[in-house]
């Protein structure tokens, strides 16, 4: 069973703090990792992707990948109330032509 | 910008009706997907297609079928709608980097 696991939350952080969202996956051969953000009542939208071990930064967002431990995380620095949303982790399992596997998402609430 | 459109934002149908949900993308993507999203269950893949006339079952295909007659259009069909198919249905189109672009969703209620 190919699985992507996330803590459902809610994760509550004060405005200006760092929010840390975590995701683990079952398939050691997974190659591509994505973070989507979904506001309430809206569709998911891609915010970051990462393919290699280590960190990838984009503005206030940093994705971290550790393939040996099979986890990927998303850090949001200087969290804003507008970051309040559900964050979905998605993984391409193996390197074949298989569809994205999504986690159930972590709900983040940034308190002003 | 990639645009994915879905035929309806809200739909109310009766048990036993045949329901068509249509999805159109304008970026010439090969890959298209249908998901349903329910509270606590996340996104669940119903069917996907990697080319015209091609379809593959996802994780929960029972009670659904699909049609991909043209590259830009991917239709989801509920042959005989049931109350347990009340859900938010999301269509997505995928580029060559596996980035998925979602439509606005159709909230289907089956009475």
Image (spheres, coloured by chain):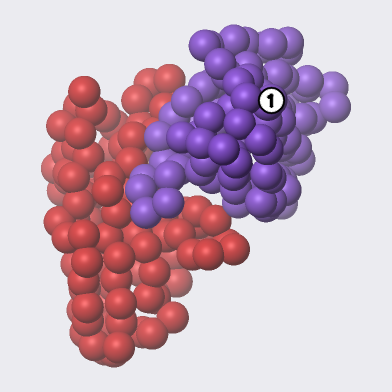
Chain colours: A purple, B red
Circle 1 sits on which residue? A18
In the image: residue B22, left or right of residue A100: left
* Camera-side residue of B44 and B64: B44
Residue A11 vertical position relative to residue B83 in the rendered view, above or below: above
Residue count near mark 1 (Cα–Cα under 10 Å), binned few <14, some 14–19, many ≥20: some
Residue at 56 percent across and 16 percent down: it is A60
Residue at 34 percent across and 59 percent down: it is B89
In the image: residue B44, left or right of residue A13: left
Tell which subunit mark 1 falls on: A
* Quarter in which the C terminus of chain B is drawn: bottom left
Residue A60 shows in the view: yes
Residue A93 shows in the view: no
Q: Position of residue A3 (x, y in %)?
A: 69, 47
* Quarter in which the N terminus of chain B is drawn: top left
Q: Position of residue A89 (x, y in %)?
A: 60, 37
Residue at 53 percent across and 30 percent down: it is A80
Residue B35 vertical position relative to residue B26 in the rendered view, above or below: below
Does dot 1 land on a helix, a strand or a loop?
loop
Based on the displayed image, in which of its 4 quarters is residue A108 positioned?
Answer: top right
Residue at 38 percent across and 21 percent down: it is B96
Q: Position of residue B13 (x, y in %)?
A: 22, 81
Name the residue furthest front. Answer: A112
Name the residue furthest right. Answer: A69
* Camera-side residue of B58 and B81: B81
Q: Position of residue B74 (x, y in %)?
A: 23, 49
């Amino acid at each position: 069973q190919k699985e992507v696991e996330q803590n459902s939350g809610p994760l509550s952080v004060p405005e200006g703090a760092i929010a840390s969202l975590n995701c683990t996956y079952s398939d050691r051969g997974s190659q591509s990792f994505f973070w989507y953000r979904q506001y309430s009542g809206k569709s998911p939208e891609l915010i970051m992707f990462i393919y290699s071990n280590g960190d990838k930064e984009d503005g206030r967002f940093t994705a971290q990948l550790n393939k040996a431990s099979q986890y990927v995380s998303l850090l949001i620095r200087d969290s804003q109330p507008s970051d309040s949303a559900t964050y979905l982790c998605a993984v391409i399992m193996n390197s074949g032509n298989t569809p994205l596997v999504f986690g159930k998402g972590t709900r983040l609430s940034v308190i002003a | 910008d990639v645009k994915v459109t879905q035929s309806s934002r809200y739909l109310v149908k009766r048990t036993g009706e045949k329901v068509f949900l249509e999805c159109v993308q304008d970026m010439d993507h090969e890959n298209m997907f249908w998901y349903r999203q329910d509270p606590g269950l996340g996104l669940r893949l119903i069917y996907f297609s990697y080319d015209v006339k091609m379809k593959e079952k996802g994780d929960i295909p029972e009670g659904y079928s699909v049609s991909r007659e043209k590259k830009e259009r991917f239709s989801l069909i509920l042959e005989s709608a049931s109350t347990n198919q009340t859900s938010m249905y999301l269509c997505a189109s995928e580029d060559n980097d596996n980035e998925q672009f979602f439509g606005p969703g159709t909230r289907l209620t089956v009475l």
